[in-house]
Image (cartoon, grey):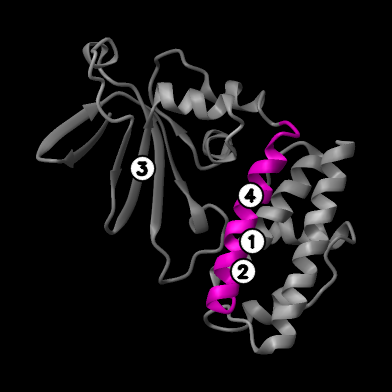
Amino acid sequence: FWVIRQANDLLIYPTILMVVTGSQSWHLANENSDVDIRGIYIKPTEKILSLHKGRDTVEKQGALDIQFYEIEKALGMTLSHNGNIVELALSPASVYITKAGIRFKEIAKKFLTRRLKKYYAGYATSQRKRAAQNRGGKALVYSFRELFSGINLMKRGYIEFDFRVLWQQMKDDGIYKSGLLDQVFARPKWEVVGEEEMRQFDHEWDALLRILDFEADRS
């Protein structure tokens, strides 16, 4: 069971799974990184059958950034090929708790399809915009992570969660040969220095997006 105090109510819901996500699961965390916990829960039957179901997401921000989805919403997101939910379900850090008979991991595996290209490209694009505003930072690294993840999925049919392993695979495949990421990682705040490096980032990003499109088309 998972318990959280929200709006002065103590909510106790049967939980299907819990998982630590974000930088912790990608092996990109440092001493300043927060801990993101995601999960899926089941509302009581009287709530499910009610005309006023209430919220389908329970959230709490603080030392732990917590976000849990009700099973109906989680399944709807899965049907929409939402990569966030698919990754949540297939993460090696996922802990399946309930014995409700819902084999969510097996369900999620069926949605490892070419349609996830849209998710990875979209998330990478949003991170790219943040990177441009912040002169790099973790958004730059995350934008590469999303493109690498999408390319790897289209080529190999599975999600690699460890960014260092993923990065090495891109090098071994001859897809990413640049030293820009090495330079960024060598700096405390993963910043980009100068306009030339920013242009290099934009050039590499555009090239990786084309590779993602190519790999998806032939996957």
CA–CA distance in space, label 3 to label 4: 21 Å
Q: Which residue is mark 4?
A: 122
CA–CA distance in space, label 3 to label 2: 24 Å
Q: Which residue is mark 3?
A: 67
Task: Estimate the x, y position of residue 165 in percent, counting from the top left.
Answer: 71, 57
Image marks 4 and 2: residues in contact by CB distance under 8 Å: no
Near mark 3 (Cα within 10 A), the count class, few <14, some 14-19 or many ≥20, is: some
CA–CA distance in space, label 1 to label 4: 10 Å
Q: Amino acid at mark 2?
A: Leu
Q: Nearest to the eye among marks 3 and 4: give it.
A: 4
Image marks 3 and 2: residues in contact by CB distance under 8 Å: no
Q: Secondary structure at mark 1?
A: helix
Q: Nearest to the eye among marks 1 and 4: give it.
A: 4
Q: Amino acid at mark 1?
A: Ser
- The quadrant of the rendering that contains the N terminus is top left
Q: Amino acid at mark 4?
A: Gly
Q: Which residue is mark 2?
A: 140
Asked if residue 119 is among those painted magenta in the image, a careful observer would answer yes
Q: Residue at x 74, y 77 (%)?
A: 180
Precedes in sequence: disc 1 or disc 3: 3
Q: Which residue is mark 1?
A: 143
Is 101 left or right of 123, judged from the image as shown?
A: left
Task: Estimate the x, y position of residue 202 in percent, counting from the top left.
Answer: 74, 71
Near mark 4 (Cα within 10 A), the count class, few <14, some 14-19 or many ≥20, is: some
- Residue 108's place in the image compared with 118, above or below, is above
